[in-house]
Image (cartoon, rainbow, N blue to C red):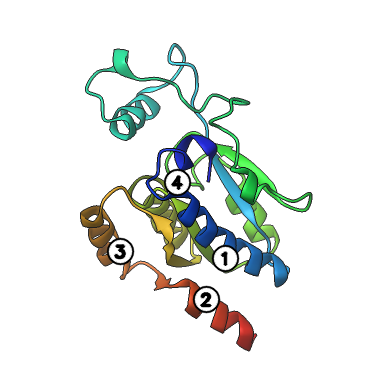
């Protein structure tokens, strides 16, 4: 939920509010909250995977057209103010699409004996899907809160949600809240 992504989303304010509903509810239940922050390296030192990912996200066909738009400490790299991590929360940087690849997320979750994770955010077909699949591969139960996940198109959304049915659990904000009410 970075500024550089959120400002590009049609109806971004409405989407941020849906994500905020889930995050606020998780906070009220003293659930651990982790934010992943996509980070880009300067183009001169970025690797093949990062450049290919940037080309896909930016919808360009050559590396010369790629703009490193999530450089550390840039405005676009920051978490949207409405969701700013609290002192008891962290935002960790990731270079790859999965929040688990090259980050300390797996270690932090295992150390806390967490077995299931709720996942929200943007963009479903770029960062969320790889994170859900990677979580399942690592033995977690990923719970995708689908109406708090943004997608670039309805066609992509349908394809990804259909594909993820076999990987983890999908739910919606109301069901997530009702489940927490029973805990």
The residue where tag 4 is placed is: 98
Q: Residue 131, can we see it?
A: yes
Circles 2 and 4, Cβ within 8 Å, touching? The answer is: no
Q: CA distance from mark 3 to mark 2?
A: 17 Å
| Dot 1 alpha-carbon crowd within 10 angstroms: few under 14, some 14 to 19, many 20 or more | many
The residue where tag 1 is placed is: 22
The tag earlier along the polypeptide, 2 or 1, is 1
Question: Viewer-nearest of labels 4 and 1?
Answer: 1
In the rendering, which numbered label is found on residue 161? 3
Q: CA distance from mark 4 to mark 3?
A: 17 Å
Mark 2 element type: helix
Mark 3 element type: helix
Q: CA distance from mark 1 to mark 3?
A: 19 Å
| Dot 3 alpha-carbon crowd within 10 angstroms: few under 14, some 14 to 19, many 20 or more | some
Which quadrant of the view contains residue 74? top right
Q: Residue 113, can we see it?
A: no
Please state the horizontal and vertical placement of residue 21, each as a whole percent of the image.
58, 65
The residue where tag 2 is placed is: 176
Give the residue drawn at x 58%, y 28%.
75
Q: CA distance from mark 2 to mark 1?
A: 8 Å
Give the residue drawn at x 28%, y 57%.
157
Mark 4 element type: loop
């Amino acid at each position: 939920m970075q500024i550089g992504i959120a400002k590009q989303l049609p109806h971004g304010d409405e989407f941020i509010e849906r994500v905020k509903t889930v995050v606020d509810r998780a906070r009220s239940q003293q659930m651990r909250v982790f934010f992943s922050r996509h980070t880009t390296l300067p183009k001169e030192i970025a690797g093949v995977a990062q450049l290919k990912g940037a080309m896909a996200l930016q919808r360009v066909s050559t590396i010369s057209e790629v703009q490193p738009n999530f450089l550390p400490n840039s405005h676009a790299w920051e978490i949207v103010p409405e969701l700013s991590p609290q002192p008891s929360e962290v935002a960790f940087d990731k270079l790859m699409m999965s929040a688990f690849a090259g980050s300390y997320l797996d270690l932090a979750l295992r150390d806390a004996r967490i077995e299931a994770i709720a996942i929200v955010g943007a963009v479903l077909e770029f960062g969320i899907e790889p994170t859900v699949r990677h979580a399942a591969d690592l033995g977690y139960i990923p719970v995708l809160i689908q109406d708090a996940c943004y997608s670039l198109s309805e066609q992509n959304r349908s394809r990804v949600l259909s594909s993820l049915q076999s990987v983890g659990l999908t739910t919606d904000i109301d069901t997530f809240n009702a489940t927490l009410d029973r805990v």
